[in-house]
Amino acid sequence: MRRLLGGATLAGLVAGLVMAFGIAPREATQGNVQRIMYLHVPSVWVAYLAFGVVLVASVVYLVRRDDRADRLAHASAEVGVLFTGLTIATGSIWGKPTWGTWWTWDARLTSVSILFVMYLGYLLLRGMVEDRERGARFAAVLGIVAAFNIPLVHFSVIWWRTLHQPPSLMKPGPGAMPGIIVAALLVNFAAFTLLYVYFVTRRTVVLGLEAEAEA
Amino acid sequence: MADNWSFVIAAYGLAVVVLAMYWRFLVRRERELDDAGVVRQQLRQAPGVSGHAQTEPGSRSPLP
Amino acid sequence: MNQKRKLIVGGIVIAGALTYMIYAGVTQSAVYFVTPAELRAAPVPGKAYRLGGMVVPGSLKWEPRSLDLSFTLSDGTATVPVRHKGTPPDLFGEGRGAVLEGSWTADGYFKATLIMAKHSEEYKAPHDQSEAGYRELLKTLRGEGR
């Protein structure tokens, strides 16, 4: 089962790369540097998804006190932090040649940094409390509170003036992107989602083994 | 319009390195814990064989 | 115990970073930039601003040897003359959005120290020649959404 998931993920990632570099055209305004988007946007999607899962698993843990939900939240938060970091790094690398700066404190970049640091704090909190059950409870509360940042990050470009451009994909009306670019993005969305599932299942297993070893 | 291929390569290269490192961390940690689990189970099943604490390679918590 | 101390230090660092970012967020990102009309309404010479708008087509002058750059920035209502020394980013150009860091001078122009190109959310295949609407871009510049 895991083999299958791993294989599908790998195939998806390869297909994503082929779409990003082979099929999708050179974007007219930005040139080839736009291809970073096929990495940047799916990464932030995985981050949203991961923190959404943290939210749900945290609620489930608080209601049922099931350790498996706690481990899922922990694993998902870790993967989410990984992909948030990747989003910020790739965005910065793209920003230097296109915007002319690695970084600026606009609402999108500020809110995504807050998101990143909050979940980093979440992971740290898990290690800080000695009593495991109490730690899990605190983490669950933080996992729910921190989720309020997700819409803040996403809509920051609409609610405030920013350097970062607004979303293209969910724009109503005539498409802001040619179909082929949308297709390349969607393939990468799928591949990254598989990668997320693969990472989280493996991390959850490892966390389970760790708990067993401690018991 | 400059294409800035070096930036594209930097972004994708970074992603590959980070994701591969995380994957390797997961694989290693799991193997390590699996080995430790097997050792613990063996110790539990045959306590007479190893009466004293053994430090097996890969065993995370040697018996007290 | 040592491990715990490390975690506590990490916690303090994270809390500090969060506080700083929320502070930076409230003071800087809430009004990330002012528009030419807003600057024109109450210009303070010497004060640092972030100014956002569109580069008026036909206004751009670029001296590659001396790196002197001058253009007019517009938000559709008011315009501001801008001068800068240096190479602008790739995406900077006439009819495109830009956010500038700099200050208003007593001589009646905006002295930009940093030019950032604002990208629109439009992506185009090479053969697709339809220009992004000027009005649409102005809207995203003002952050009015759609």
Image (spheres, coloured by chain):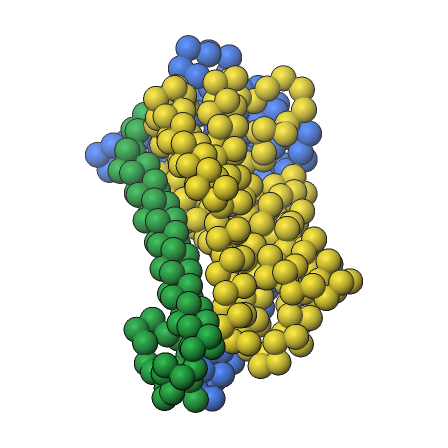
Chain colours: A yellow, B green, C blue
Q: Residue at x 46, y 11 (%)?
A: C129
> In which quadrant is the N terminus of chain B drawn?
top left
Q: Nearer the viewer, residue B55 or C117?
A: B55
Relative to B4, is C32 above or below? below
Evaluate whether residue C88 shows in this view: no
* Percent of width and height locating residue A30: 39, 27
Q: Nearer the viewer, residue C109 or B64?
A: B64
Q: Residue furthest right?
A: A63
Horizontal side, residue A133 vs residue B59: left or right: right
* Percent of width and height locating residue B15: 37, 45
Horizontal side, residue A143 vs residue B44: left or right: right
Q: Residue at x 51, y 58 (%)?
A: A205
Evaluate whether residue C121 shows in this view: yes
* Percent of width and height locating residue A177: 53, 21
Quadrant of res A170: top right
Q: Nearer the viewer, residue C49 or C2?
A: C2
Q: Residue at x 68, y 29 (%)?
A: C146
Relative to C3, is C38 above or below? above
Q: Nearer the viewer, residue C115 or B44?
A: B44
Relative to C113, is C14 above or below? below
Q: Residue at x 58, y 66 (%)?
A: A122
* Percent of width and height locating residue C67: 27, 38
> In which quadrant is the C terminus of chain B drawn?
bottom left
